[in-house]
Image (tube, helix red, strand yellow):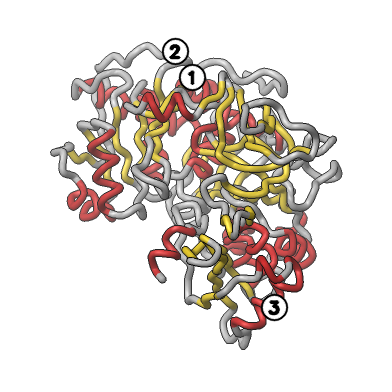
Amino acid sequence: MIINASTPPKGTVRSWLDHRAENDGIAFTFPDGEADLTWRELRDKAKLIAQGLVAKDISKSESIAIVYPNCRDGVLAIYGVLYGGFRATMINLVAGNDAISYALDHSEARMAFVHPSAIDLFDQANESSIERSELPLNSEHAEIYDLQPEDDALLMYTSGTTGRPKGVIHSHASLLAGGWTTAVAHELGPQDRGFCVLPVYHINGLCVTIMGALVSGGSISMCARFSASRFWQNAERSKVTWFSIVPTIVSHLLHAESEPSGLTRDRIRFGRSASSPLAPDVQSAFEKRFGIPIVETMGLTETAAQILSNPLPPAVRKIGSPGIAFGNDVAVFDSDFKPCDVNVEGEIVIRGPNVMKEYLKNRAATRESFAGDWLRTGDLGRMDEDGYVFVTGRLKELIIKGGENIAPREIDEALYSHPDVVEAAAFSVKCDRYGETVEAAVKLTDGSQVVEGILQDICQEKLGDFKRPDRVHILPELPKGPSGKIQRAKIISML
């Protein structure tokens, strides 16, 4: 099986894992101390888990809840479920009891693989009498189901910031395509080792790293969680050649004291940033300090992660843009669902092999999310003459002040221009005079003497008086989702 830059991978996760097992080699390393996992051992254990589920009369494509942090057994659980033809239902460990309970019930799972550290969390949320199991689970004599590329593979719930979480269903084909778009854009091969510090119950951790390695034949170094103080040390110990993080992590690394060694700087080809826009000032400062290029990208749960990416150096990377399409088609549509002219703002839409099958048990939401065969992302943006997309905001996050649209992102970027700002997020607040007005929240470096007025003045200088936040709240921490993406709606409820 060879990666073709113009053709998505054929087959299933099972067939690709069988292929990788033939050549063996290291699949996963774990800097936190767990034993390495080879492709052959991973395949053999995945098959045993799959046979065990069949022996328990679990039907093909039935949901199996996976309640695991990043760890060796978590990888085995994911591959075991996928190998057997079941629907891997990833449970977000930090979503809160109500959201976890909803996902468990809505998925109709009858069985869950639960890490020992998550047992209490699972038991509190388990209102559907789901059977809890730990690995290993095996029955060598059970015959596993036949698999086709269009069969269900993954069920992952959106963050639900604007209502109930939606269950996104991916097939084996779209899951592999998600890994393929990453591998093609970043020119990944068997010699590459990615660094996974994002949770695998988020689409970035699962598709970009796990599926990216499966398709490319490379390997992954997986940490239980992100640590700014140990990031470069673990990267050096594991000999990684690339890493995938989010803008808040980029900012935290930039403000941390630890530095990569010269050998690590030379070995790492690039870092990639995704999940939310990366402020240009933060990107430039990171690259200047560490000498490692950051490739900004964009992806969705509904697209098995990546839809856009900047090319690797020395090709053109446009700072402030998540790049061009790789492996799928991307366009910008107006309100009538017609293509916009060059550099005209509209909604970013996508079609391709990595697009989801549907939202589980939600035909209305599935129907509303498509314009013909184009998936509506809900993101506003424009496309330049070279095909680079520039994201200007979210349809549902726009601040409408006195009838004028203000994208929170431009306020964020103005705030990030101050070197003491580690995290920043603007949001709307109801206002009798304008309907809505602008406020923001920031986290500052330890010991910073920056006050609210300084940050307001920076915004006024860069954006004008109309977009100057009425308040800039200085907080010890901003609420974030599982990928590290700042959650604006939760800031409002906190305040």
Marker disc for residue 428? none
Q: Earlier in the sequence, mark 1 or mark 2?
A: 1
Mark 1 and mark 3 lie on one chain; the one further toward the N terminus is: 1
Q: Please report the residue visible at 26 percent of the width from the left and 42 percent of the height from the top.
A: 102
Q: In this view, does 471 lie above or below 287?
A: below
Name the residue carrying label 1: 12
The residue wearing badge 2 is 148
Q: The C terminus is located in which quarter? A: bottom left
Residue beneath label 3, please?
457
User: Residue 138, how many percent across, how many down?
Assistant: 26, 29
Query: In the picture shown, does residue 374 fall above or below 240?
Result: above
153 vs 348, left or right, is left
> Tag 2, which secondary structure?
loop
> Which amino acid lies under the numbered mark 1 shown in the image of this protein?
Thr
Distance (Cα) linking label 1 and label 2: 7 Å
Tell me residue 408's x, y (percent).
Answer: 60, 58
Q: How crowded is mark 1: few (under 14 residues within 10 Å), some or many (20 or more)?
A: many
Q: Where is residue 192 in the image (x, y as percent from the top left)?
A: 66, 41
**In-front residue for pair 321/180:** 321
Q: Residue 96, position in %: x, y?
A: 31, 54
Q: Is residue 360 visible?
A: yes
Q: Check contact, mark 1 vs mark 2: CB within 8 A.
A: yes
Disc 2 crowd rating (10 Å Cα; few below 14, some 14-19, many 20+) is: some
> Nearest the camera: 351 or 175?
351
* Labels 2, 3: front one: 3
| Front one among 85 and 250 | 250
Q: Residue furthest front?
A: 433
Kindly identify the amino acid type of the residue bearing the numbered disc 3: Asp
Secondary structure found at label 3: helix
State the residue at coordinates (64%, 58%): 236
